[in-house]
Amino acid sequence: MATYKKRGYKPKTSVEKEVELEAGSTTAEVFSSLDEGASRTEAWVEKNQKSIFTLVAVIAVGVLGYIAYQKFIFEPKQVEAANEVYQASSYFEQALTAEEQKDSLYLMALNGNAGRYGLLDIADKFDGTPAGDLARYQAGIAYFNLSQYDKAIAFLDGFSSGDAMMTPVAKGVIGDSFAQLEQYDEALSYYLQAADLSNNALTTPRYLLKAGTTALQLGQNGLALKAFTRILDEFEDATEATQAKAYKAQAEAAQ
């Protein structure tokens, strides 16, 4: 969890994961060890049969409870959350491209309007659903654009997603927020995380450049040189490459 100096002023998501476990062995040694323990196991089972059956029953109840939760609580909750997030997200999207009244649109996205939930309500009420995670992400970006950097950090540091773009952007905006708060060591840490989370031509060179320039500012010239060199080696066609070339020369001269 990020720490920051408060000047005023996270949750957690859950995505459905299917995990398939396969266990097996083809070696004679493993089978031999299983055979050797078989007689001892049979005696133990006979002695503790009642306890075993009780445990199996408890596990079965737990599994059935989980299935019921998924079917009758979690899935309907996801549908409701998706319906609620639409209007708030619409205000958020409008704010991103608006030339006027951007702050008003961000505030409507955050707080809701005309009796509809805002991003803050959705992130809280539907925590653990994809819609709740999206609301948390958008709320963090909205707070950043409203210059409420502590709140942006708090929301985005609690964001979790498998999305190859949103996750590095969330980390990068945390870095930008720390930079605005003049906490450059923290900013550098998050820029590096953002660059490494997803290797793509859009977010990786962007946050490598931010990491490099922040490292230069902190006097960490070797780290800066490494960041600029990676941009030029791996993303030579990126828009950041021209700046990276100039900054690389600066980092080399400073060493």
Image: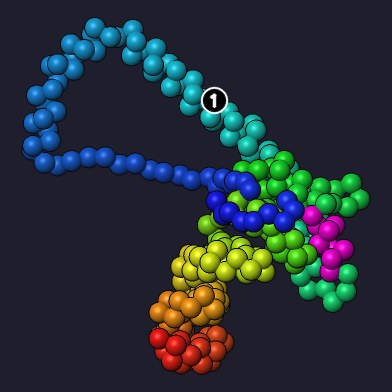
Residue drawn at x 12%, y 35% is 30
In the rendered view, would you say 49 is above or below 87?
above
Between 144 and 32, the one lying in front of the other is: 144
Q: Tell me: 165 left or right of 89.
A: left
Membership of 81 in magenta stretch: no
Magenta residues (range): 102-110
Quadrant for residue 156, please give it: bottom right
Q: Which residue is mark 1?
A: 65
Between 242 and 47, the one lying in front of the other is: 242
Q: Tell me: 29 left or right of 9.
A: left
Rendering coords of residue 147 (x, y %)? 75, 65
Q: Tell me: 192 left or right of 120.
A: left
In the rendered view, would you say 181 is above or below 121?
below
Camera sees residue 246? yes
Quadrant for residue 146, please give it: bottom right
Quadrant (top left, top right, bottom left, bottom right) of the C terminus: bottom left
Mark 1 burial class by Cα count in 10 Å: few <14, some 14-19, many 20+:
few
Between 229 and 102, the one lying in front of the other is: 229
Rendering coords of residue 210 (x, y %)? 55, 76
Residue drawn at x 52%, y 75% is 218
Which secondary structure, mark 1? helix
Residue drawn at x 88%, y 69% is 101
